[in-house]
Amino acid sequence: MANFIILMGVSGSGKTVIGKALAPKLHAEFIDGDNLHSQRNVDKMAAGIPLTDADRLDWLQLIAKVGREHAAHGTTCIIACSALKKSYRDLLREDNASIRFVYLKGSFDLIHDRITRRSHQYMPSSLLESQFETLEEPQADETDVFTVSIDQSIAEIVEEIAKADLLS
């Protein structure tokens, strides 16, 4: 049984909004992965400096640990985490057999439009291009990834994810 869902995608793809709307439907706790970043990472992003793989390592390890803890307690959690590279997703998969990913997929133009209209505590729209450059879209061999287009309403996205029955 899956009880650890990662909502993944570039900044502005809707991870937090979708996670907050999806959690009650799946009787899960929503955790915004942004809140698990170190202050050093937050400061770096706020300054418009993209994170490196080394910067992300502790953050990804903490997210994986939180998922394992939920699995150990038999509770379900949904964590918003960009998980842009396959290597990041592989790290999250380690010792997390119950993990599933939901890739919130959208075009640069759609997401850029959304991100310029929102307020975020430290993620400026200028970093969106680096996020797309870093993004390694999930491939067919990543069978634990469900892809959903974000070119629809929040309610439609949440319903599509809920119908995917990711927790069974």
Image (cartoon, grey):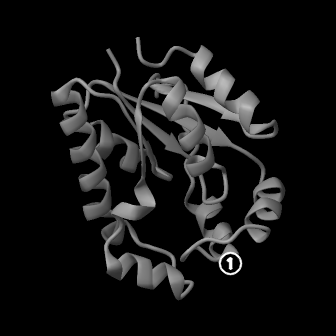
Q: Which residue is mark 1?
A: 126
Residue drawn where x is 60% and y is 55% of the image: 10
Residue at the farthest left position? 72
Residue drawn where x is 42% and y is 17% of the image: 167
Query: Quarter of the image containing the C terminus?
Result: top left
- Percent of width and height locating residue 153: 80, 37
The residue lying toward the viewer, choosing from 53 and 68, is 68
Q: Is residue 8 left or right of residue 125?
A: left
- Percent of width and height locating residue 77: 36, 35
Residue at the farthest top position? 168
Quarter of the figure with residue 74 = top left
The residue lying toward the viewer, choosing from 150 and 19, is 19
| Mark 1 residue type | Ser
Q: Is residue 32 left or right of residue 103?
A: left
Residue drawn where x is 32% and y is 14% of the image: 1
Residue 49 at least partly seen: no
- Percent of width and height locating residue 102: 54, 34
Residue at the farthest bottom position? 47
Residue 20 at least partly seen: yes
Count of numbered tags? 1
Q: In the picture shown, does residue 16 fall above or below 133? A: above
Quarter of the figure with residue 158 = top right
Secondary element under disc 1, as helix, strand or loop, is helix
- Percent of width and height locating residue 63: 30, 50
Q: Is residue 151 left or right of residue 50?
A: right
Label 1: few (<14), some or many (≥20) within 10 Å? some
Q: In the picture shown, does residue 10 fall above or below 127? A: above
